[in-house]
Image: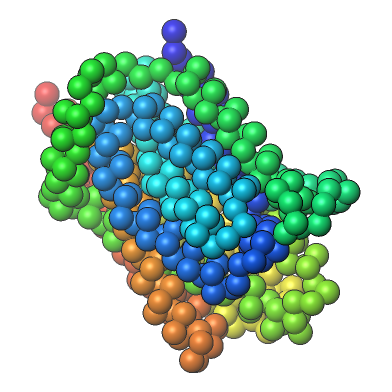
Amino acid sequence: MNTTRRIQRIYYVLVSLFWLSVAFPMALMVLLGQARGLTLFHVGVLSGVYSLTIVLLEVPTGGLADAIGRKVVTVIAYSCLTLASLVTLFAFSFPVFLLAFILNGVGRALASGALDAWFIDALQAVDPDIDLQPPLARAGTFTLLSLGVGTLCGSLLPHAFADLPADGTAVLTPLAMPVVFDIATKVVLLLLTLAWVKEDRAAVRRSDWAQGVREVPAIIRTGFDLSRKNPTILLLLGASLASGFALVSLESFWQPHFAALLGGSTGNSLAFGIVMGGNFLVGMVGNLLATLLSRLLNKRYGLVCAIFQGVWGMMIIVLALQTRVPLAVLFFWLAYLNLGILDSPQRTLLNREIPAAHRSAMLSIASLVSYVGGMLGGTGLGYVAEHVSINTAWIISGAVLVVSLGLYWQVDSRESRQRLHLAACLDKN
């Protein structure tokens, strides 16, 4: 029999394995590609194709999960991601790498929201009144821990297998070993998903998959209609757009910014590793703080998000003004600390508004909006960073976040009015 504790254990193990597998080759994938003949232009094209694949498939695959079952789509996603890693292992030309990146994009789009939707529905099936914020915060902590451990281990693996043939000359080389560990971890993940995830939904029992697939367009339309007609969801999507816009500026420009402060990247690889590792650590702390801060604010998650969306924006603006490395690192980490605090309250607010039957599609729509924000930020702020300065791009992104806190403030105001109305109705009875 499922209990909330057992459901959480299953989800945390699967989430940890997923992000561990993603992190193994993360730091060395470009180096592996270059050793096998890719140019930086090829790398840029592959990244663009990967992102485009996700954007095109994000919402349809979410609708598919609602139509034929979250477990089924999750299994297909992990199978596709395993195949993508396997193709990468044997890739020695741009077309083969392109196939791997397309498969990876398809897998990530399929995976987006499917297991999360199963987790939320399974918890609410056992306890309809469960507070989602604490388990979502713990999930975020496991995610960041896995990314940190996976990145570190993946970076050390080439040294452990240094006696293998030189990179670019064989399939199994030092730089290829993180991909091997990635594949092995994904196989374990796939087997555990098949064994552990149980889904008692009518969609899973349908024998006519074609019927389920035919329902996808209707589910997607319903998801967009729900987004359009629900003011709270619209406000949350607007905030996600702003967050995606700002986050891409941090992820894209921190390396050249710190390289300039350090006088170049040559010989400073340890410093970059410390900065990146610090991001995972403070993100974990932020996820843990989110539960405490939410309790202090009486679980007013809209207010929590409003405060820390604004603080996040201010940290980025202050970061842009720093000229000394220690202070720049401090405010860079503080920005990611606020991002960690925001994660679980924002997800809790969104999942409160989503009907279970359309959860995967709605979560995919939210993810799509964040990707759109990232694309706008990457293009617009990239132009500013190139032609003006990175500092100016960061000031703009920080200002967008400060302005967007008003969206969360409106969410909190709507929830406060609903609580007062409910209290008044109870008093009358």
Give the answer, above or below, for where 386 lies relative to 185. below
The spot of residue 163 in percent (x, y) is 88, 49
Visible residue check, residue 96: yes
Outermost residue to the right: 163
Q: Is residue 51 left or right of residue 262?
A: left
* 154 or 264: nearer the viewer: 154
Say which residue appears at 81% left-offset and 57% top-offset: 166
* 156 or 6: nearer the viewer: 156
Say which residue appears at 20% left-offset and 22% top-offset: 208
Image quadrant of residue 425? Answer: top left
The spot of residue 422 in percent (x, y) is 18, 35
Q: Is residue 65 left or right of residue 281?
A: left
Q: Is residue 241 left or right of residue 28?
A: left
Say which residue appears at 37% left-offset and 35% top-offset: 114
Q: Is residue 182 left or right of residue 10?
A: right
The spot of residue 237 in percent (x, y) is 29, 56
The spot of residue 274 in percent (x, y) is 75, 61
The quarter of the picture where the N terminus appears is: top left
Outermost residue to the top: 1
Image quadrant of residue 2? Answer: top left
Say which residue appears at 40% left-offset and 47% top-offset: 106
Give the answer, above or below, for where 429 lies relative to 336. above
Visible residue check, residue 16: no
Outermost residue to the bottom: 387
Give the answer, above or below, for where 115 lies relative to 149. above
The quarter of the picture where the C terminus appears is: top left
Image quadrant of residue 246? Answer: bottom left
